[in-house]
Amino acid sequence: MKVRFTKPALAELDAIFAYIHQHNPVAAGQVVARIREITSQLGRFPDMGHQKYKPGVRMITVRRYPYLIFYTVEKDEVLILSVRHGARQLFDEESAVGVATIRRAELAGGETSMTAANDLAIRRALELAGVEFIDENGGGAGVRLRKGAKEKPRK
């Protein structure tokens, strides 16, 4: 079965490589090679991943690395929809803000382009995850992990 990446999935793969490459060029190549290896296996074994919350979407974990591959199986091909860091998965689902909206906000320089409702939803998701927002107090606003914050059980 043929394996094809969507444009957003290819962009995510490029971003993963670029980010890791800044810190460790060898590791960047290894991570992307592992992701490519797993997507190649999906062509032979398309049911390797498990069903996700959206009908027809499957997910597989990249072992040894914290990345998830989201894909669909259509007729004679596996379509890779997204490749992202595992920590993003819970955040996207918890905030109910679309991945494209989050991606635009991550790439925007300066002021965010998000609506106040999306901004609030993301803030609440971060607070649920144990992030504490610190108001301006002369030293600048910031964030920190809440003391005694426990990991929220996954659904």
Image: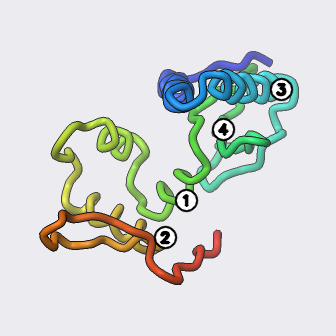
Residue 39 appears in which quarter of the rendering? top right
- For the residues labelled 1 and 4, the Cα–Cα distance comes to 14 Å
Nearer-N-terminus badge (2/3): 3
Residue mark closest to the camera, 2 vs 1: 2
Image mark for residue 115? none
- Tell me if mark 2 has few (under 14), some (14-19) or many (20+) residues whose alpha carbon lies within 10 angstroms of its own: some
| Residue 21 appears left or right of 103 | right
The residue indicated by pointer 2 is: 129
Going by the picture, which residue comes out furthest to the left?
Answer: 138
The three-letter amino acid code for the residue at tag 2 is: Ala
| Count of numbered badges drawn on the protein | 4
At 60% across and 22% down in the image, what residue appears?
A: 25
The three-letter amino acid code for the residue at tag 3 is: Gln
| Residue 85 appears left or right of 103 | right
| Residue 35 appears left or right of 98 | right
The residue indicated by pointer 1 is: 90
- Tell me if mark 3 has few (under 14), some (14-19) or many (20+) residues whose alpha carbon lies within 10 angstroms of its own: some
- For the residues labelled 4 and 3, the Cα–Cα distance comes to 12 Å
- For the residues labelled 4 and 2, the Cα–Cα distance comes to 23 Å
Asked if the residues shown at circle 4 and circle 2 are in contact, with their CB atoms under 8 angstroms apart, the answer is: no
- For the residues labelled 2 and 3, the Cα–Cα distance comes to 34 Å
Residue mark closest to the camera, 2 vs 3: 2
Residue mark closest to the camera, 4 vs 2: 2
